[in-house]
Each structure stands twice: as C-alpha cells, then as structure tokens.
Image: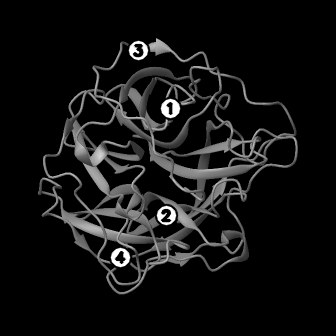
Amino acid sequence: MSDLAPIPDEENATMTHPPAATPIAPTTAPAGPTPSAELLGTPWAVDRADGTPFSKDPSVIRLGDRYLMYFTLPPEEPSAQRGWHVGIAESHDLRTWTLAGRLRPSGDAEARGLAAPGAVVLDGVVHLFYQSYGNGPLDAICHAWSQDGVTFIRDATNPVFRPTGSWNCGRAIDADVVVDGDRLLLAYATRDPQMRVQMLGVAAAPLDSDFGAAAWRDLSLDAPALAPELPWELECIEAPAFVRRGEQLVMFYAGGYNNEPQQIGYAVSEDGVRWTRGTTEPFLPNGEPGSWNSSESGHPGAFTDDDGRTYLFFQGNDTRGRTNFLAATEIHWDGDRPRLSQST
C-alpha cells in the first residue's frame, strides 16, 4: 500500500474472531463518463463508522466453490491512528461480495497495523502474505495460513522477509506470490535508501518449505527488478500482481504514488527476475474527469480462474483518496500480451 505522505501512527487493535458473513451493502461509486474498461458489477467498498466507503489493495483467490477477496481496510473509527487491517469478502460470481471476516493486528510485528495482502492457494491451504504497517523503513512482509480462508494462523517467524540489497532501504511492502516450478516467487515493493523512490524486487522460497523467515532468498540483491522510468510512473512503481502465461510471467504493477494519479502498467519475464515492460503507456489509466476513478486506477490484483479466464482487480476513487472503491475487469490475451475488455 503506497504511502506518499508520512505514515500515521495508527490506533492499536487486537485479534478477534471474524464475524459470520454479512452483506456489505456497497456504496455505489459516483456516476460519470463510462470508464475505458468494462467492469464486473459495480465498484464497491466497506464503509467506515462514519459512512465513508474505503477499501484498497485487492487480492482474489478461488477456494472450492467460492471466491475470496483480501483487501486493506483503515481503522473503523476515522479518528483512530492505529488499526489498519485486512478485510475478507466472499463471492460466488466475482460481481457481488459479502464481508466474511477481518484479520486484525496481532503480535509485535503487526502492532501498528497490517495491509496490502497477497494470497495464493497451495494444496487446499490459503497462504496470505501481507505487510506490517506504520513502521516506515522497518515495515516487512508477514505470513499466515488458513484452511477455510477466513481464520488464519500466524507464522511464528514473522516478519518472514525484508530485502538486504544496498540499493534499497530494507523495507518490504505490497507482496504478491506465484508458483514458479519448484519455488514460490514473491514480488515486493521497497524504496531507495532516501525513502523517496518506490521500486520492485523479487525473492524466492522452495515450494516445499514452510515460507518462514529462513526460507526466503532475495533475488534482487544488486538492483531492483523494476524501477520507475516512464513519465507516467513518476517516482513510484509498486503493487506487483503476477499472472502465469505458459512459460512466461506477466506482472501488472501500479505506477505513481496514490492519486498522482496512480495508473496500471505491465511487464513480462521468463525467469521472474528480469522484467521488460509490455507498453510505454498505462495499460489501465485513471478515468476521465467526472468518472468514479478520475483520481486513480491503482494497486492491481490479478486472478486466474479454474477455467483459465483472467481478471484484474484494482482500486479507484474521485476524491483524491478520501474514499476508495474496488472494481474488476476481465483481461483477454493475445498470446502473452493482455488487453482489456472495452466498454461500449
């Protein structure tokens, strides 16, 4: 989860048992010009205590006959300074969602909050990788797992990963993972030592490991896997989202800090370490003035269903970040090159 402004000191919170599934009663996103991508359903968000819709950083999986979305939620009370946490929503059609639970901070590593989840299902077990929040350059990637996708067991070695290359500040956020042969690849966002420029790196752990702190090897020791270069990327590349296409890996990413505007691009790789951009222009730009996502189309999350169809989830708003909605669009493929479903 990007943080152009200084990270607030969030209010502390404790772990609770997740509630039974309840309707989200999504707030409808503002009307406006038709967005460039055809959306699945209506953009939605969980309301805070004062009614402000705010949800970010989606990651979607399929577990049995249902879909689960993991995403970032702010403290429920707008005045709270701690308590960023992960929401868990359930769907049977990828279009309508109900809130199934919340994963709240637990333990020293998460005392100030947690955010930006990335999920994968391995042998029927959901593995969730997420960042600690509110610790500046000390934020790192944590790990938890679940049989039902809602109640999680924390990794006793948390945090399980932070980068060590001299090109970065040692921070790791915005994790996403993908199976790559006999290993699990983890892409992460970090910053330069001056905490100014956001970039991406990649790490790996054996697929038969426990994904604890001893399992990970940083593959981006000497240089970032991807750093901002294009004008629209400004000083930030973050929020990696993997898709496997045969022998090729595709990674969607967010360029620009939140609401600068943030927009979505993609890159391709054969080894998961060296990446080449697929286009010099944003793949999914922010919307036109007056549209629900005029402030940004940000933080992608990619999901491939059992039938091989691919969907791109992302966040957007038209309030410069005071609100945030989640939306999705289907991705079509020309070989290993993605294209959007276009609105009519």
- Mark in front: 1 vs 2: 1
Residue shown at the point (75%, 47%) measured from the top left: 342
Q: Nearer the viewer, mark 3 or mark 1?
A: 1
User: Disc 4 residue type?
Assistant: Asp
Residue 182 visible? The answer is no
* Residue on which the image places disc 3: 21
Q: Earlier in the sequence, mark 4 or mark 3?
A: 3
Q: Distance of mark 4 from mark 2, alpha carbons?
A: 12 Å
Q: Gap in Å between the C-alphas at discs 1 and 2?
A: 35 Å
Q: Which mark is residue 251?
A: 2
Where residue 339 appears, as percent x and y from the top left, is: 65, 57
Task: Determine if residue 202 is in view.
Answer: yes
Quarter location, residue 47: top right
**Few, some or many residues within 10 Å of mark 4 (<14, 14–19, 20+):** few
Query: In 3D space, how far apart are the residues under numbered discs 3 and 1 (Cα atoms)?
Result: 25 Å
Q: Amino acid at mark 1?
A: Ala
Marks 4 and 3 sit apart, C-alpha to C-alpha, by 40 Å
Q: Earlier in the sequence, mark 2 or mark 3?
A: 3
Q: Amino acid at mark 3?
A: Ala
Q: Position of residue 59 (x, y in %)?
A: 45, 43
Locate the C terminus by quadrant.
top right
The answer to whether residue 187 is above or below residue 341 is: below
Q: Residue at x 67, y 61 (%)?
A: 283
**Does residue 296 lie above or below 27 as drawn?**
below
Q: Which mark is on residue 271?
A: 4
Decide which of tag 4 and tag 1 comes sooner along the chain: 1
Distance between the alpha carbons at the discs numbered 2 and 3: 32 Å
4 and 3 marks in contact (CB < 8 Å): no
Secondary structure of the residue carrying numbered label 2 = strand
Separation of residues labelled 4 and 1 (CA atoms):
43 Å
Q: Which residue is mark 1?
A: 80
